[in-house]
Amino acid sequence: MVLALAGLSWVTMVDRVISSLVLVNNHLNHSNIISNCCFTANGRYLCTASWDKTLQLWDIQTGTFRSHGGLTLSKGHDGSVSSCSFCNNESLLVSGAYDSTVAVWDLESLSRTLVLKGHTDWVTDVSISSDNNWVASASKDTTVRLWNIEDIEVIPAVIEARMAHGMGYHILKCEECGKDFSISRLDNSDLVTKCVFCRLSTPTRSHGLPPPPLQFVN
């Protein structure tokens, strides 16, 4: 179990495996107060929302946040980000902010694909339904709004945003064979330096030494 606490400008994580506290200091990413945080359903990614107008994605499963910090999602809001929420299948992230808007992020391209406007004051909280069809937002303007995003895949603005940011992949050159290969933008390109074929052909610790020969006893 990993516990995340939002507050000030750092995140405290309790790692069950090593039974110790890990502090992710603000100099790695956020430059202001962290206002909210949420996990993906599978527990791999943590998202933090901050008054520095950005969100950060932290890869908890691989632990790369310890040395590389989080992955920044910026230019989504003009004001401090107050809240964030993942959908069940980790394909979308929704955020609310003090600029009175709700942003919908595509996690394949790591881009803001849609801005929902209608509130007249701060957005204090956001949530997305289990079927990904509805976004709910609460605001200081004393209203709760329901936004239907069922047809988000065919909205022209969403299609243009995805095309502008690619389909969510980095193109890298394999350090062993020299051929180009692609990885997801969510993966750490500093750790993946070989194509899948070269990685498969390289012995790993998990395979270790070959098993000893069988001995038959009469």
Image (cartoon, rainbow, N blue to C red):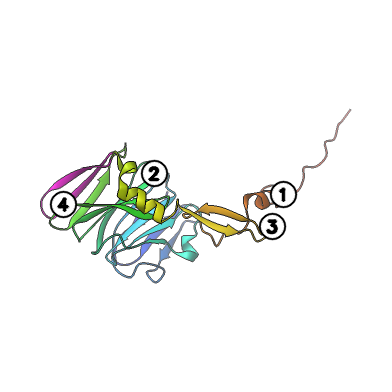
User: Which segment is the magenta one?
Assistant: 133-149
Q: CA distance from mark 1 to mark 4?
A: 59 Å
**Which mark is first along the chain, 2 or 3?**
2
Where on the picture, by quarter, is residue 88? Answer: top left
Which SS class for mark 3? loop
Identify the residue under disc 1.
Answer: 208
> Which three-letter amino acid code belongs to the residue tagged 1?
Gly
Labelled pair 2, 4 in contact (Cβ < 8 Å): no
Q: CA distance from mark 3 to mark 4?
A: 53 Å
Q: Nearer the viewer, mark 3 or mark 2?
A: 3
Image location of residue 188, percent across then percent down:
51, 58
Give the residue pinned by disc 2.
41
Label 4: how many residues lie within 10 Å, few (<14), some (14-19) or many (20+)?
Answer: few
Q: Residue drawn 54% across and 57% down?
A: 171
Q: CA distance from mark 3 to mark 2?
A: 37 Å
Residue farthest along the right direction in this orientation: 218
Secondary structure type for disc 4:
loop
Identify the amino acid type marked 4. Answer: Gly
Spatial CA distance of label 2 from label 1 is: 33 Å
Q: Which residue is mark 4?
A: 118
Ranked by sequence position, the earlier of labels 1 and 3 is: 3
- Residue 20, above or below 85: below
What residue is drawn where x is 44% and y is 64%?
Answer: 69
Determine if residue 188 is in view. Answer: yes
Q: Judge by depth and name the residue closer to the eye, 16 or 56.
A: 56
Asked if the magenta segment contains residue 142, the reply would be yes
Q: Residue at x 34, y 52 (%)?
A: 105
| Residue hosting label 3 | 177
